[in-house]
Amino acid sequence: MSLIQINATQVRELLPTKDCIQAVRAAMIAFSQDNVQVPLRSSISVEAGKSLLIMPGACKELGFYGVKLISLHADNALKRLPTIQGAIILFDHESGEPKSMIEGSSVTGLRTAAASALATQLLARTDAKTLGIFGAGLQAETHIDAIAAVRPIESVLIWARNYDAAAAFAERQSKRTGLTVSAVADPIEAAETDIICTVTAASEPILKGEWVNPGTHINLVGSHSLTAREADTALITNARVYVDSLASTTAEAGNIMIPVKEGAIDMSHVIGEIGHVAAGDLAGRINDTQITLYNSLGITAQDLFSAVSIYRRFLNS
């Protein structure tokens, strides 16, 4: 057995943004058509502030199954270490032989942004040119690249709770991408854009429905529990809502389930899964005045298909 190890630098070299979007498209279609096995993620509390997340997935047609293992250590920030670390292990579907161990955080960063880009490609107005990002971390960076790959973005507005951090981030991104990237102190300014991506760790709404213009597309990315949300109830109520997984939504999506609990909407308000839109089985945006919204939780199918693409490209490099 020869287990190929692929590090973060190699991941970024082997899976360009546009190719990652295609891998995620295939993953979401396979998921929504029940061609990939993806049970809900499980976790183990190692000790206070430390946990292990276990996310398996299998697809016979792809020829692989695998598991993403993620460690969460809240106190690592104090040690100047990453709070989230992990790996994806791929197994041959026929023989069961472990084939590759791929650095997980880099794959997560790429495929999460690619999922938002896929939703944007399917739901945003074709003439959308301005991007507002709530957050100034790694996901903010990967989302700039991914959204710019599917729409002709001319300007980007960055809002974060720490304005100085947002300004420093915006300056770096302007130099890196050549786009006009600016920081704003008022979140309303970032919300007055054609496309909005929220990539924060907020537990209470940072994006309000009253700020959002007709025709906007929104990707909600940062919240992953029933008690946390990035958008208020008014925004969810006014939007045409899509999700990555209906099952995960009821178990983990506070953005959706808090308004359900409040009685503002019921689950019929969710139009369906983005994989069905990608497959052509479900309508996306109906007109240019609708607010469309994609709630992203992330599913292991995205990791599995992205990891297989990386592994195959490594073998051919």
Image (cartoon, grey):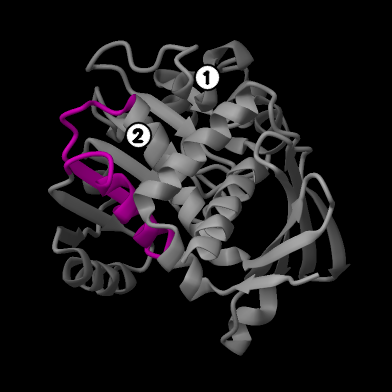
Crowding at dot 1, Cα within 10 Å, few <14 / some 14-19 / many 20+, comes out as many
Closer to the chain start, of discs 2 and 1, is 2
Instruction: Please name the residue that numbered disc 1 is placed on.
Output: 276
Left or right of 299? Residue 213 is: left
Residue 97 locus on image (x, y percent) = 82, 58
Q: Residue at x 47, y 26 (%)?
A: 236
Camera-side residue of 167 and 149? 149
Residue 107 lies in magenta, yes or no?
Answer: no
- The label shown at residue 120 is 2
The answer to whether residue 73 is seen in the rendering is no
Residue 153 locus on image (x, y percent) = 18, 45
- Amino acid on which the number 2 mark rests in the picture: Thr
- Amino acid on which the number 1 mark rests in the picture: His
The answer to whether residue 144 is seen in the rendering is yes
Q: Residue at x 24, y 73 (%)?
A: 172
Residue 1 locus on image (x, y percent) = 81, 70
Residue 139 lies in magenta, yes or no?
Answer: yes
Camera-side residue of 14 and 42? 14
Please tell me whether mark 2 or mark 1 is closer to you in this view. 1
Magenta residues (range): 123-152
Q: Residue at x 84, y 52 (%)?
A: 96
